[in-house]
Image (cartoon, rainbow, N blue to C red):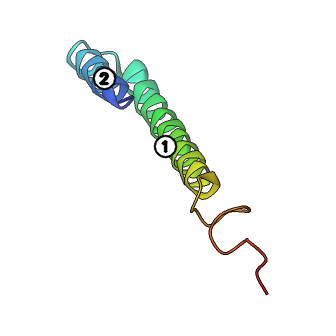
């Protein structure tokens, strides 16, 4: 799911705040955008990590029970 749409909304809100002489709100929206970027990045990393873990657990993957784990001597 694409979650960076929120950054577009925050940018629009900041533009409105700036155009309507609301400098404190505009600054707060900058801070909020930084928080949103950090959380989106963390979510993306978590999702990528889970996807990688799922691939390793699939038959033939590099996880336990995958190819090469048969114990043939």
Local crowd size for mark 1, using a 10 Å CA cut-off: few (<14), some (14–19), many (≥20): some
> What residue occupies the far left of the structure in this picture?
19
Pick whichever of labels 2 and 1 is earlier in the sequence: 2
Give coordinates of residue 47: x percent, y percent.
Answer: 53, 42
Q: In the rendered image, which quarter contains the N terminus? A: top left
In the image, is residue 21 above or below residue 27? above
Give coordinates of residue 31: x percent, y percent.
Answer: 48, 33
Q: In the rendered image, which quarter contains the C terminus? A: bottom right
32, 50: nearer the viewer: 50
Total numbered badges shown on the rendered structure: 2
In the image, is residue 72 above or below residue 9? below
Q: What residue does disc 1 label?
A: 44
Q: Give the left or right position of residue 34, taking residue 15 as reference.
A: right
- Where, by quadrant of the figure, is residue 22 drawn? top left
- Where, by quadrant of the figure, is residue 46 drawn? top right
Estimate the spatial distance between the alpha carbons at disc 2 and disc 1, rounded to whole Å.
25 Å
Q: Secondary structure at mark 1?
A: helix
> What residue occupies the far bottom of the structure in this picture?
73
3, 33: nearer the viewer: 3
| Residue drawn at 20 percent across, 17 percent down | 19
Q: Give the left or right position of residue 23, taking residue 73 as reference.
A: left
| Residue drawn at 36 percent across, 23 percent down | 23
- Where, by quadrant of the figure, is residue 68 drawn? bottom right
Query: For the residues carrying marks 2 and 1, which lies nearer the camera in this image?
Result: 1
Q: Give the left or right position of residue 47, taking residue 71 as reference.
A: left
Local crowd size for mark 2, using a 10 Å CA cut-off: few (<14), some (14–19), many (≥20): many
Q: Secondary structure at mark 2?
A: helix
| Residue drawn at 46 percent across, 26 percent down | 28
In the image, is residue 45 above or below residue 11? below
Q: Residues at badges 2 and 1 in contact (C-beta under 8 Å)?
A: no
36, 71: nearer the viewer: 71
- Which numbered marker is on residue 14? 2
């Amino acid at each position: 799911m694409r979650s960076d749409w929120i950054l577009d909304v925050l940018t629009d809100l900041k533009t409105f705040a700036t155009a309507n002489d609301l400098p404190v709100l505009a600054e707060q929206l900058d801070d909020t955008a930084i928080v949103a970027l950090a959380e989106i990045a963390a979510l993306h990393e978590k999702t990528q990590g889970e996807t990688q873990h799922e691939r390793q657990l699939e038959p033939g993957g590099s996880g336990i029970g995958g190819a090469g784990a048969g114990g043939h001597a």
